Amino acid sequence: MKNRTEPIWTTIDEKIRYPIYIGTDIIPDFGSTFKEHLPRCSQALLVTNQTIEEVHAAKIAQISESLEDIGVDLIVEAIPEGERTKSYWGLGMLYDFFAEHQLDRQSVIIAMGGGVIGDLAGFAASTFLRGISLVHIPTTLIAQADSSLGGKVAINLARLKNIVGGFYHPKMIFMDVSFLQTLNVRELRAGLAEVVKYGVIMDSELFNYIEANVENIIAKDPDVLEWLVRRCCEHKIAVVEEDPEERTDRRAILNYGHTIGHALESLYHRYLHGEAVSVGMVAASYLAVKTEIFPSADAERQLKLLSRIGLPTDALGVSIDPLLQPMLHDKKRRGNTLRFVLPTKIGDITIKEVPKKDLPDLLQYLVEKGVFSPSEDATDEE
Ligand SMILES: NC(=O)c1ccc[n+]([C@@H]2O[C@H](COP(=O)([O-])OP(=O)(O)OC[C@H]3O[C@@H](n4cnc5c(N)ncnc54)[C@H](O)[C@@H]3O)[C@@H](O)[C@H]2O)c1
Ligand SMILES: [Zn+2]
């Protein structure tokens, strides 16, 4: 096992290479690690949200003290929580903070939070002064296992997820798995959807491990969580290094479950990202069964695991009609076809082009399988 003193390094190109520290209760070492990688910085602004600021006041104080020890002033700004801040509104708020505190090119933004803070503060850092240094301290399972890695930063437009963004890599990622101890169980489960995703797309051993450890994971066994986070990071890094900007199908495999998941999430705000991805993975697995590339026994195995975790495996009450529009806007579309990431067995996937005109029929199959309803009986709570 690696420990904090031995980070995993990720190399994007000749210019971009950075360490990922993973451990449990490693926050006291933040300052000394920061100094190693950002020796010229004297001012840092930590962006978090109001919930995390309250729940993790002690850890923020440790970060501040450890930075003070190396001569770095820390400013903390907390913004309202929730996906709605990943917007023009939230972005404007951050730019105003950055300007107010007179950040310069030597300043560093520390994004401490889940995927929302990471994506938003990352996007703000990438554009302010044409880019200032960024450090991630991910605090949710989604952020540790997935979103803080890979350099994607973005905001949403009204109903379009992650539609404005870029690629911007941090100078380091500092993952303290003990943050997950305060995560509520619904958020933990949502994060596990992404972990199961890695199992299905590339690692049957990981899938088996989750099957064998569902109870320990939900009980937040620290060793089990650290093992899972590390394993997912290793996979994400490997994929991103091969295809940093999603120019080939290599990185696109990470979008398994996300075509339908994003559509669901953008229309029905009651779904957390991971919950929508869970339904999206069930849907994708049935599409793979329907196109005869995936054994139905494997689809049932995935469904059983997601349901044991406590994730939604259907979206009854939602009909397929409203989902079509956002799916046709999906970033993975190409001309008249949509590209679906479909499993071929637990641990392997393929990318299948589906002509747009075939989409309604294909989605109808998901109604037959009980994933969606024939007609809408729920309205958006927006
Ligand atoms: N950039 C990428 O590659 C990528 C990948 C996957 C997901 N995402 C994005 O990530 C977002 C979802 O991320 P998320 O699930 O982390 O959501 P989130 O950032 O909204 O965090 C979820 C909730 O957990 C709370 N929280 C965070 N850390 C906590 C802690 N340690 N203890 C207690 N509560 C805590 C937050 O306040 C929030 O209410 C979506 O916007 C999604 O699009 C991005
Ligand atoms: Zn995701």
Image (tube, rainbow, N blue to C red):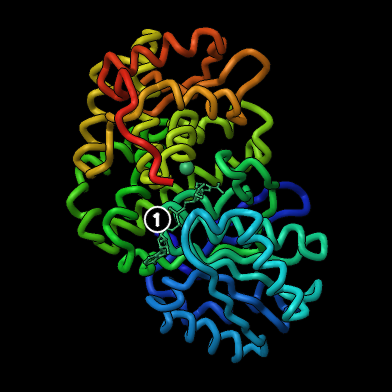
* Count of labels in the image: 1
In this view, 147 is above or below 301: below
Residue 166 place in picture, x, y as percent: 70, 47
Residue 277 place in picture, x, y as percent: 40, 37
In this view, 128 is above or below 87: below
Q: Residue 121's image quarter?
A: bottom right
Residue 240 place in picture, x, y as percent: 60, 42
Query: Who's the residue at 52% across and 51% down the image?
Result: 147
Classify mark 1: helix, strand or loop.
helix
Q: Residue 304's image quarter?
A: top left
Sort mark 1 into few (<14), some (14-19) or many (20+) by Cα contacts within 10 Å. Answer: many
Residue 67 place in picture, x, y as percent: 59, 85
The residue tagged 1 is 141
In this view, 40 is above or below 246: below
Beta carbon of the mark 1 residue lies under 8 A of ligand 1? yes
Q: Amino acid at mark 1?
A: Leu
Query: Who's the residue at 26% across and 57% down the image?
Result: 185
Q: Does residue 80 appear to the left or right of 367 in the view shown?
A: right
Residue 198 in view here? no
Query: Who's the residue at 32% across and 57% down the image?
Result: 225
Quarter that holds the N terminus: bottom left
